[in-house]
Image (cartoon, rainbow, N blue to C red):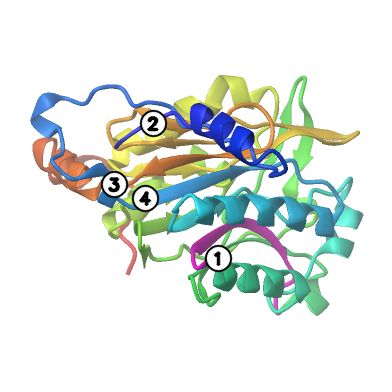
Amino acid sequence: MLGFLTRPLHRLLSLLCPGLRIPRLSVLCAQPRPRAMATSSSSCKLPLVAVCQVTSTPDKQQNFKTCAELVREAARLGACLAFLPEAFDFIARDPAETLRLSEPLGGKLLEEYTQLARECGLWLSLGGFHERGQDWEQTQKIYNCHVLLNSKGAVVATYRKTHLCDVEIPGQGPMCESNSTIPGPSLESPVSTPAGKIGLAVCYDMRFPELSLALAQAGAEILTYPSAFGSVTGPAHWEVLLRARAIETQCYVVAAAQCGRHHEKRASYGHSMVVDPWGTVVARCSEGPGLCLARIDLNYLRQLRQHLPVFQHRRPDLYGNLGHPLS
């Protein structure tokens, strides 16, 4: 994984084009790899991904404008895939507002994103869309749906969040996602993209390693956890969990996050990042809305798995097959 700092580039572009508004960029230089696993790939040929960090509000059109600006900047910088966080469409004040603002996959908002993907010519991971499913009329509840669009704007995969966040954390306030949301019925097989095979998950799913193990055994090379972590669990668990999922599955982990205060009732931790299969944070967003960039080196991933073949050493005869491979 090549890391490179973009702050000097950001300042240079601002000086050359003073009227151009450029979203904040941040990429962290990677720590050195073990020599035996250093890659000989030309870094400029490796696929580039962009991780977008936003502060969604109940204003859906303003949220789209913010996300579209980041996606267009990602395309200008050469990314083949841009990741948006959970609730990229909106974050409401209460369950009633959540249900009122929700849409079906065939609604106006997803159509705007399909047009955006076509316009920019890149894939989009839409990390958590408030979806009115086919059972909306019966249930009056929605799904937290991770939608993957290709560069032609076609929906190539949908994953509906299977683990709902019903928790009460002191100092962070209660969260009861099931008040408005139905858990998804199944996992989605990893999807081939220009950056690698992606396994889809959403936020709270990262606390369940069985899911990530199942995706890895099904061929995932990149796990993605679009999220909206809180101000208490974020500092304590966010980076630790993401690095753990990367190390145990030997996958890249991409985590686009919500940040800042959404309204008077809710705020999010931010710290969007990319972790490589060695567990190194190779890209991280700075404070506030913006994006970070990382290159995905699948040759490095394969070398690591060859040198440290943990999946060949598993003992399901002793502890069962945690995370059954997907059919």
**Residue placed at 57% from the left, 47% from the top?**
226
Q: Is residue 127 above or below residue 159?
A: above
For badge 2, the amino acid type reads Phe
Please rate how many residues cluster around mark 3, counting C-alpha atoms within 10 Å: few if below 14, some from 14 to 19, many from 20.
few
Of residues 228 and 297, which is closer to you in this image? 297
* Residue 163 appears left or right of 289: left
Q: Which mark is residue 4?
A: 2
Image coordinates of residue 176 in percent, x first then y, are 76, 44
For badge 1, the amino acid type reads Cys
For badge 3, the amino acid type reads Cys
In the rendered image, residue 240 lying in the magenta stretch gets the answer no
The residue that disc 4 covers is 222
Q: Which mark is residue 44?
A: 3
Mark 2 or mark 1, earlier in chain: 2
Secondary structure under badge 4? strand
Q: Is residue 323 visible?
A: no
**Residue placed at 51% from the left, 76% from the top?**
152
Q: Is residue 138 above or below residue 215?
A: below
Q: Is residue 325 above or below residue 246?
A: below
Which image quadrant: the N terminus? top left
Image coordinates of residue 87 in percent, x first then y, are 70, 51
Range of magenta residues? 120-134
Q: Which mark is residue 120?
A: 1
Mark 3 or mark 2, earlier in chain: 2
Mark 4 or mark 3, earlier in chain: 3
Answer with the quarter of the image where residue 266 lies.
Answer: top right
- The label nearer to you, 4 versus 3, is 3
What's the magenta bit mostly, secondary-structure-wise?
strand
Please rate how many residues cluster around mark 2, counting C-alpha atoms within 10 Å: few if below 14, some from 14 to 19, many from 20.
some
Secondary structure under badge 1? helix
